[in-house]
Amino acid sequence: METALKLNNVSKTYYLAGKTLRVLDDVSFSVEAGSTTAIVGPSGSGKTTLLGLSAGLDRSTSGTIELNNIPLGDLNEDDRAAVRNRYIGFIFQNFQLMPTLTALENVMVPMELRGEKNVRTRGKELLDRVGLGDRLTHYPVQLSGGEQQRVSLARAFANQPRILFADEPTGNLDAETSGKITQLLFELNRQAGTTLILVTHNTELAASTQRIIRLAGGRIIADEKQ
């Protein structure tokens, strides 16, 4: 199988006020293309840091990370941004939509940044697929939390990413909305053949993936195939 992500002996250390804080400690694993993986663990276990390093949002202190067979350690900030724009989609707990843009405009932004054509048509199609075809001109403040997360799902898939990183995608949603968003996320992911890597406290969401990696104290304590 093709490998979408590979981490080898990755550590991340912060130096704060003369103290050393090791957030990740010698983490190694690889993720097969097209698979779904959940990263779980208590608060402070290093989950979000691991996600950020894997996506090239930050640099590891030691170890190597390959994303889509591209070694991230060799790249400068601009090159890492180009890799993210080309291969990666993101979904965040707090949606991170641009408040001054409509739902449609929010979905169009990543496609416009890539210089694609027919972005309005594709944006409408994506919002239709997430059930928001009638909310194209609404601004984030006019949408519920579940609707905002649907917009961010449509935006995440706009670039047809090879890998989708989701950080607590249901964290700000009630149980019912959470279930609907989870179903939609896996449906879109399956249709697109995307590799899904998500961080979550939601045990039901984690159980929906093919693999669960458990972190504690910055180390992997279990790696379970389901």
Image (cartoon, rainbow, N blue to C red):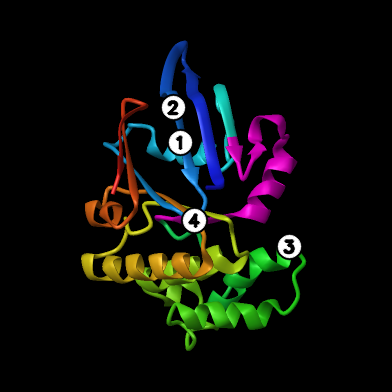
Res 50 label: 1
- Identify the element where label 4 is drawn: loop
**Residue bearing mark 3:** 114
Amino acid type, callout 1 = Leu
Q: Look at discs 4 and 1 and give the one toward the viewer.
A: 4
98 sits left or right of 225 in the view = right
**How far apart, in angstroms, are the residues tagged by discs 2 and 1?**
9 Å
85 sits left or right of 52 in the view = right
- Answer with the quarter of the image where residue 57 lies: top right
Residue 109 image offset from top left, x and y in percent: 65, 67
Q: Look at discs 3 and 2 and give the one toward the viewer.
A: 2
- Identify the element where label 3 is drawn: loop
- Residue ID at (42%, 40%): 48
**How far apart, in angstroms, are the residues tagged by discs 4 and 2?**
22 Å
User: Which mark is first along the chain, 1 or 4?
Assistant: 4
**Residue bearing mark 4:** 34
Decide: is 204 above or below 155: above
- Answer with the quarter of the image where residue 119 lies: bottom right
- Of 66 and 91, nearer the camera is 66
**How far apart, in angstroms, are the residues tagged by discs 3 and 4?**
23 Å
- Numbered range of the magenta stretch: 66-93
Q: Look at discs 4 and 2 and give the one toward the viewer.
A: 4
Amino acid type, callout 3 = Arg
Report if the CB atoms under discs 1 and 3 are less than 8 Å apart: no
User: Which mark is first along the chain, 4 or 3?
Assistant: 4
Residue 194 image offset from top left, x and y in percent: 52, 59
